[in-house]
Structures are given as structure tokens and as C-alpha cells.
Image (spheres, rainbow, N blue to C red):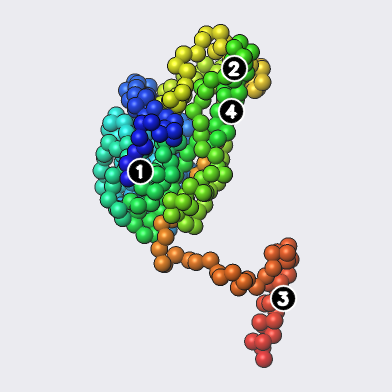
Amino acid sequence: MSALPPDSPMNVFDRNAKLLHRERAAKRVDAHLYDYIKDEVGERLSDRIFDIKRKFSKVLDLGCGRGHVSKRILNESVEELTLVDMSPSFVQQAETTKGIKIRKRVVDEENLSFDANSFDMVISCLSLHWVNDLPGCFRRINNSLKNDGVFLAAVFGGDTLYELRSSLQLAELERHGGISPHISPFVEIRDIGALLTRANFTMLTIDTDEIVIGYPSMFHLMWDLKGMAENNTARNRNLHISRDILIAAASIYKELYGKPKEDNTIFVPATFQIIYMLGWKPDPSQPKPLERGTGQVSLKDLYKLDKIIKSREKTKLGKDDK
């Protein structure tokens, strides 16, 4: 299994440009200032790891970044952790905790080459939304997992940065009568379940969350996105946005979405939609759904389920007394 050919219509993102973005972000002297969103999501992912009452022998952190999840994983949950990212600087800077055996490798998420049945768990924090062949990536992740292994990830969802997207589009419509893609496309939550199922994952859990951050202006938001290495890398992107478009978009952003602070100054909110997904590689030991027709309560009676349970408990007690 290899990456998509260069001329594939599914090749939406310029991976070389994304590598350059990540390397530039990693080499900033103030790189830590831009980790706030990924650190927050990394903490929420690590909490979900702790919720799984199992100790994992070998775990892969795919697209580890600067260690947003790995620095919160304890040896109570993981014995050996492999950190991989397409950015050599991110891999080098990734933080970890004591007591865990650490391996670090430079690997492109689009072209995984791990042996089958290598890991007990694969985790990924806000990295896979830049992968062109997401179905293929999910299949390779599934192949690298052992039976009953778990895949736990977070990606940005389709509503991410909708304020910035609409402001730029309205500014371009006003100035040029048309729009260009300035925000990279994101996966929709309705598609995640189908993609995981096609990749042979089972017992899926998918949920979504929103993180809203306030910025002094649209320009502060765009500066932070660059510091996060989350700036646009769509192949059909416009490499230059004119000054008048940016000024108009900032004004529209402030007018449509601006909110007052206590000191009467205005801040602009930016929404980051986070999609969390969890799936297991099939194994005979996993619980199976009951056969069709074996249910004992009709769906139309679910509203009175408590009464049905109490009635059956009384019947059982009556039989036991006899």
C-alpha cells in the first residue's frame, strides 16, 4: 500500500508545502506559544486513553507534532511509545514522560510502512486532516494494529474556522465577483463512521466538540494559524491574497462575528470543531450484537422501559419465593 499518484484527483493537499510549514513552525523561538489548541486536544485524548482499562505494550503516536499527547501519557497505560511525524524537527522536539520506552521516526502519515500486527494502539492528534488518501490511511492503520487493537484520533471537522472562511468569501465576492479557496477542506463528521467501517474497524465511537478562541482581530488569528503550521496547503489555493481583500475580510469578520469584552473593546471568535473517533480491530473475543429478532422489548415500548424492568423483577421475585 503506497501513497496516491501525483495526478490523482484525490490529491487535494500539497504535502511538501505542509512539511515546509511544520519545519518553519518548529524552528520558531516562540513555537510553544502556538501549541494551545493542540495541547488542549492532546489532553482530552490522553484522558480517553486512561478511560480504557488496559495497559498497552506498543503504541504508535501518528503525527506526534511537538508531543501534544505523548507528554501526557503515563507508564501506567503504555510500555513502549513510537513517535512519528513527517517533520524531523517536530519528532526531535516531541516531549515524553519518564518510565516509557520511546522510539522516534520520521514517517509521512500518507505512506505508512509498519509491519502488520505491530501495535496495540494507534493515536493521532490533529494531524490526519492533512492526509489526501484518508481511506487508505485508515486501512494502513488497521493493518498495523494487532487484533483487538484500538485506533483513537482527533481531527478538525467541517465547521472549523467557518467565520474566517465566510468573511474571506464575502470580501472576494464584493471585490472580484467570485471566490477562491483560502481555507483547506475538512472532513465531515457524517463521513467518519463510513470511512472507519470501510477500513475494517468495529465498535465505533464518534463524537464532536467545539473550541472557540477569541482574537483581537482576524490578522491575529491568521498569524496564530501560521504558528501552528495549520495554514492552507490546498493545491488549488491562491498563493497571494491582495491587501484590499484582507482589509475587507477583517472588517466583515468584525462586523458579523465581533463580540464586546468587558472593557468595551471587540474581539473576534474563531471556532475549531474537533471530531474524536475510536475504533477497534475485530477479534473473536469482542462482544457481538444479538441476532436479529432476539430482542425482548419493542422499540415502541422504550419510553416505558423502567416499568417493564420493574415488572419482570417482581415476577422473578415471586417465582423465587415459591
Q: Disc 1 marks which amino acid?
A: Asp
Q: Position of residue 171 (x, y in %)?
A: 60, 15
Cα–Cα gap, marks 2 and 3 = 66 Å
Q: Nearer the viewer, mark 2 or mark 3?
A: 2
Residue at the spot 64% in from the left edge and 87% down from the top edge = 320
**How far is mark 4 from mark 2, CA to CA?**
18 Å
Which of pointers 1 and 4 lies earlier in the amino acid sequence? 1
Gap between marks 1 and 2 measured at Cα = 41 Å
Count of number-bearing discs:
4
The Cα–Cα distance between marks 3 and 1, rounded to whole angstroms, is: 50 Å
* Picture disc at residue 61: 1
Of the image marks 3 and 4, the number of the one nearer the N terminus: 4
Q: Quadrant of the C terminus?
A: bottom right
- Name the residue: 49% across, 57% down: 203
Q: Which residue is mark 2?
A: 178
Q: Quadrant of residue 158?
A: top right
Q: Residue 47 at what x, y percent from top left?
A: 46, 47
Q: Position of residue 59 (x, y in %)?
A: 33, 49
Which residue is under mark 3?
311
Local packing at callout 1 (Cα closer than 10 Å; few below 14, some 14-19, many 20+) is many
Q: Nearer the viewer, residue 103 or 163?
A: 163
Number of the label disc, if any, that sits on residue 162: 4
